[in-house]
Amino acid sequence: MKTINTYIIALITGMIAISCSSDDDNTPQVINEDEVITTVRIQLANSIGLTTTLESVDADGDGPNPPVFSITGEPIIENTEYVGSVTFFNETVTPAENVTLEVIEESNEHQVFFTPASGLNVTTAYGNFDDNGNPLGTAFTLTTGEVSGGNFTVTLRHEPTKPNTGLADAGGDTDVEVTFGISVVIQ
């Protein structure tokens, strides 16, 4: 009987020792969460100093209130090249956080896409790139054609496939997507 009790105690002690072993050889993986973005600001400037600002502010983030869109400054004129920049902010914290700095720092894991609706006579070209020479898009050029109007959508993707041929095959998660109704007018 003592032998059985000794055997059971040894078995239980061994099981406890195994269940309490350390898993230090498995380093925890750092999870980089998607950014919180409440404001998207697009600045456009042409060669004669005319500037236009497109801004979307979604103050309650994923809350029930829709974003507020505004276009200020000069009209976007036909047959003109604009130097553009996109800035992302998290305004749920004080002071507001400029998320663009993180997007640029993690350029291999982000890409901004520009999608003009058919009928809107604008084209875009990337102005900055990640460490591997793939497009990032926080800097870009926008070139207008003849007078037109339509939607202009800006999408920030987190961990897209790079290189890609555009938004359709980029994959990844959408950090933010905003659509502006814009017009290209006569100078």
Image (tube, rainbow, N blue to C red):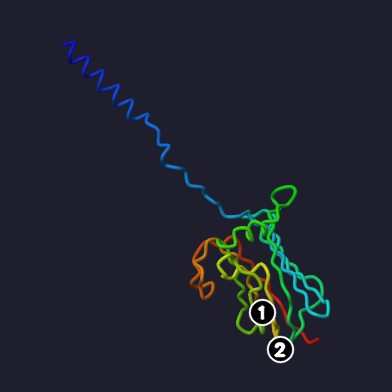
- For mark 1, give the secondary structure: strand
Residue located 66% across and 84% down the image: 121
The answer to whether residue 35 is left or right of residue 10 is right
| Quarter of the figure with the N terminus | top left
- Give x and y (percent) for residue 87: 70, 63
- For mark 2, give the secondary structure: loop
**Count of marks placed on residues:** 2
| Quarter of the figure with the C terminus | bottom right
Position above or below: 14 against 6: below
The answer to whether residue 183 is left or right of residue 50 is left
The mark lying in front, picked from 2 and 1, is 2
Closer to the camera in the image, 65 or 180 = 180
Identify which amino acid the numbered label 2 is placed on.
Glu
The quadrant where residue 89 appears: bottom right
Question: Residue 146: which numbered mark, if any?
Answer: 2
The quadrant where residue 145 appears: bottom right
Identify which amino acid the numbered label 1 is placed on.
Gly
Question: Residue 112: which numbered mark, if any?
Answer: none
Residue located 64% across and 55% down the image: 61
- Give x and y (percent) for residue 101: 67, 57
